[in-house]
Image: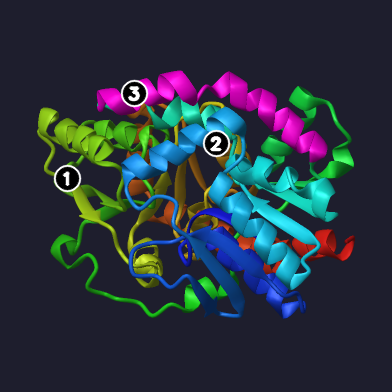
Amino acid sequence: MLLNAPYPADIRVKKETGALLKAGHEIHLLCLRKKGQAITEFVEGIHVHRIDAGKNNYQLAFWDVIMSLTFEHPKFKTAIHTIIRREKINLVHVHDLPLAGTALALKKELGLKVIVDLHENYPEALRTWFTWKKNPIARLKNFLFMNPDRWTRWEKKACEEADTIIAVVDEMKTRLLYEHRFDADKVVVVSNTEEKTFINQSVDNTVYQNLAGKFIVIYSGGIGPHRGVDVAIKGMSHVQEPENIHFVIVGFGSNAVMQNLQNLVKERDLCNVHFLGYQPFSKFFSYLSLADVNVIPHQSNGHTDHTIPHKLFQGMMTGKPMLVSSSAPLKRIVESCQSGLVFTAGDEHDFAKKVNELYCSKKLCATLGANGKKATLEGNLNWEHEQQTLLDIYGNY
């Protein structure tokens, strides 16, 4: 496996490798190295190999430019070549589009099968990630080198050359088939469902100790312009009882993103919005299950409409209602399971309206929460069911 990030960190990679190891596969993971990490390490059954290719934003930006020019990463390519020959590896599983070209460049030479696992619509992600960037150097770099249209053309070529493409949601598969016109059997959906053991996390009853008795709406996870957290903050200006309804944000984003959100809270003079910053994954069940509503306020665009966050399934497992935007995958799943309410993406007033509706009805909250819990723990929306699709892909090789 190839991962253009440090490990352990990526929850999708962790779940996929766990399933494959149990099925008897041997896994070597090549990834980036953070300061203090070993070059090689055996992590939960995985042979992890790490390379030094950027420990700060400027170094990482340099390699982003190189990959955008050539669609190959020289440091990864050299390391891959060595590991594949030494370990006699015959299958490379690439996580996301940026490193796909690096593996595909060695496909014929080394007789490899290549799986390209598209976590998101990367070309469209480029359009949204930089929306709130203020640094003039970063903005210039993105304008000159990170061209979404060029990456879209490369996506088509990479998908044509890959042996199997994994998408995380049905909408992504539909988009790939419509835009690039290749065999439907080549694209397989392996979604970001959660393991049932998520609900076995111990509960920390102190996580909301300063908000005892309040109606808590929580957003958890990474924060960026596409996440719609700004819309939810604005919506808190319009809730009917702001002294009782509070919005908690667990997670972090870039300095520019967080400053933008904090400025918004000040501009609206809000006292019912709280930033709790990064929290360990071991506390996520506590935050989600002890809140009253779990919210995913994504903007609706080419990026968010073709991916799905893990926290949707995690939130449903807690038995609490979901409040999601009308971003296509979120809307489809929540409405089909009747596990929450949907507000119009980008509409702060509709967000507030739906929050008020949930605040006023404990019965509605209980019903929606129970539906979500049933769909994830008793139905098919869990990793125990989803992982079989991944194992079937590997079984074909």
Question: Which residue is label 2 attached to?
Answer: 67
Q: Is residue 132 magenta?
A: no
> What whole-number distance in Å separates the C-alpha atoms at marks 1 and 3?
33 Å
**Badge 2 element:** helix
Front of the two marks 1 and 3: 3
Quadrant showing the C terminus? bottom right
Mark earlier in primary sequence (1, 3) = 3
> What whole-number distance in Å separates the C-alpha atoms at marks 2 and 1?
43 Å
Question: Which residue is label 1 attached to?
Answer: 272
Please name the predominant secondary structure of the magenta segment in the image.
helix
In the drawing, does residue 75 fall left or right of residue 229?
right
Instruction: Report the magenta residues as a range.
Output: 135-161
Q: Is residue 197 visible?
A: yes
Front of the two marks 2 and 3: 2
Report the residue at 26% width, 54% height from top.
Answer: 215
In the drawing, does residue 98 fall left or right of residue 289?
right
Question: Which residue is label 3 attached to?
Answer: 139
In the image, residue 65 above or below residue 278: above
- Name the amino acid type tagged 2: Met
